[in-house]
Amino acid sequence: MDVVVELVKIYADMSLYIGREASKLWKRVCAETATEINLLVENWKYILGGLICQYIHGLAARGVHYIHRPGPTLQDAGFFLLPELGQDRAYVSETVFTFIFLSFVLWTFHPFIFKNKKIYTVLIWCRVLAFLVACQFLRIITFYSTQLPGPNYHCREGSKLARLPRPDNLLEVLLIVPQGVLYGCGDLIFSSHMIFSLVFVRTYYKYGSQRFIKQCAWLAVIIQSFLIVASRKHYTVDVVVAWYTVNLVVFFVDKKLPELPDRSVAAFLLPMSKDSMSKDENQKLLNGNSGEITEKRLRTQINGKIENGNTVHVEAVKNGA
């Protein structure tokens, strides 16, 4: 009988704990949603522009498929060095890419769930889309400059998918279907898969917090590079050009963009009450100008006071910082 009573107590305690934590999680999600909506209202043009550019890139890739001419596979060093996976194992490289893609997308939305966070979802995607658009613009120019015969199996001579039939209407050209994305030909230099993977990994390397995950992410991109060539989806030059082009583009574009606010630093230094932050400072924080606000708050705290007139202990602030 005592065992039953103890089990009932444990069940009641667990139910109470789960209910309390669920309530905290719901409040956190609601608060983060409100913050991100405010940021989206201010930055929707950049998000929309980036998504439109993704569609334009898809149209360009489909357009080059119409003028693709299948031919003998070009001599390639990677094809000599890496064994061919074959059509039945072509999914391996796509699996690695899908894992990198989904992992990054989930990470960008972690501020809605986790208490410790460094980024804003809207602002990080504005930055990522800027990197992608710049790289894809160069990619379109490159693969339209010279059309190489595709090394992929469905792009070789004798395949029905190697050349697209003349479109019957404009809608057929403008409508992008998943099959067209998976079985495209002609858009070779440089690899689109490598663009997304490198942009995502570089972004997490800068704004992520787990060193082990950063190392694993770089390892995954290196493995994907070999798998793309082994799957004969791209020539080696497509992957090599992507490695230095994407890294250079991200480096220079990142220098031109305003730095994102570090939420972990701002959350510690800034007072949590609404009254302690002016409307102008809140606007600056949302726009990414948290540096001067943080410095101002820190100087004010070290001087022994905050804006609402309450004094603080200087030693406590120094020890906490």
Image: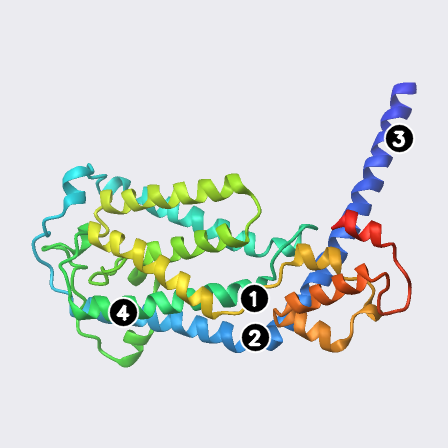
Tag 1–tag 2 contact (CB < 8 Å): yes
Q: Which residue is mark 3?
A: 9
Other residues around mark 2 within 10 Å, as few (<14) / some (14–19) / many (≥20): some
Q: In front of the other: label 3 or label 4?
A: 4
Tell me which amino acid carries mark 1. Leu
Other residues around mark 4 within 10 Å, as few (<14) / some (14–19) / many (≥20): many
Q: Which residue is mark 2?
A: 43
Other residues around mark 3 within 10 Å, as few (<14) / some (14–19) / many (≥20): few
The image shows residue 37 at horizontal and vertical percentages of 65, 70
Could you say whether the residue bearing mark 4 is in a helix, strand or loop? Answer: helix
Q: Which residue is mark 1?
A: 123
Q: Is residue 152 above or below residue 139?
A: above
Tag 3–tag 1 contact (CB < 8 Å): no
For the question of whether residue 98 can be seen, the reply is yes
Q: Is residue 226 above or below residue 57?
A: above
Could you say whether the residue bearing mark 3 is in a helix, strand or loop? Answer: helix
> Looking at the rendered structure, which numbered label has been put on residue 140?
4
The image shows residue 150 at horizontal and vertical percentages of 17, 56
Q: What's the CA distance linking mark 3 and mark 4? A: 65 Å
Which mark sits nearer the N-terminus, 2 or 3?
3
Which mark sits nearer the N-terminus, 1 or 2?
2
Q: What's the CA distance linking mark 2 and mark 4? A: 26 Å
